Image (cartoon, rainbow, N blue to C red):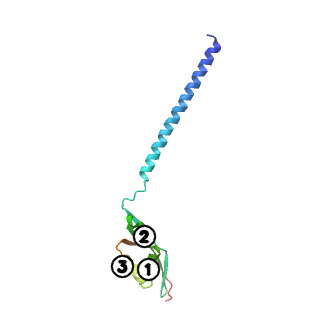
Amino acid sequence: MKPEQKTIKKSEKKVGFDRFSMYAAVVVLGFFCIAAFFIYVARNSGHNEADLSYLELQKSYVNDRGLVGRLMVSIQVNEGDKDWLADHKVALNDQFQKELTVIDLETLRTKDGIIELQSELQRKFNQVLKTDKIEAVMVTEVLLQDQRSD
C-alpha cells in the first residue's frame, strides 16, 4: 500500500466515525425531547380533579349613602354544568346587579358579613333560576371607600 492510500483510509474512517457520533447525538436528543414532551403533557393535562367550573361576574359598583363599594363574585358549579353556566351568564349578572341594590355595605366590613352575602347570593341565584346547580358564590373582590363627610 502506498502512503497516500493509508492517509485516505484513515480520513475515511474518521469521517465515518464523526457521522456515527452525529447520528448518535441526534437519536439521544430526540429521545430526551420525546420524554420531556410526555412529562409536560402528564403534568399539564388540564384535568380538573375537583370537577368544578367557575364564572366570574362583572365587577359592580354600589353607592350606599356615601359609602362606595366595588364587588366582584365568582359562581361555582360542577364541571358537567359548565354549559348551563355559560348559557345563564346574562341572567346571573342581572340578578347580581339587583341584589346589590338591597345589601348593606357596612356588613361587608366583617368576615361574617361577606360569608352571609355569599350564602344569600347562592340561595337567591338558585331560587331565581329555579335550579340547584350553583354550588357556591365566592366574593373575589371587595373594596369599600367611605366618601361621607363627617
Q: Which mark is residue 95?
A: 1
Camera-nearest residue between 107 and 16: 16
Residues at marks 3 and 2 touching, judged by CB atoms closer than 8 Å: no
According to the picture, the residue beneath numbered tag 3 turns out to be: 127
- Residue sitting at x 38%, y 68%: 77
- Residue 112 vs 7, above or below: the answer is below
- Residue 95 vs 17, above or below: the answer is below
Q: CA distance from mark 1 to mark 3?
A: 11 Å
Q: Which mark is residue 77?
A: none
Quick one: SS at disc 2? helix
Amino acid type shown at disc 1: Gln
Give the percent coordinates (x, y) of residue 54: 42, 67
Residues at marks 1 and 3 touching, judged by CB atoms closer than 8 Å: no
Q: CA distance from mark 1 to mark 2?
A: 14 Å
Quick one: SS at disc 1? helix
- Residue sitting at x 45%, y 43%: 35
According to the picture, the residue beneath numbered tag 2 turns out to be: 85
Quick one: SS at disc 3? helix
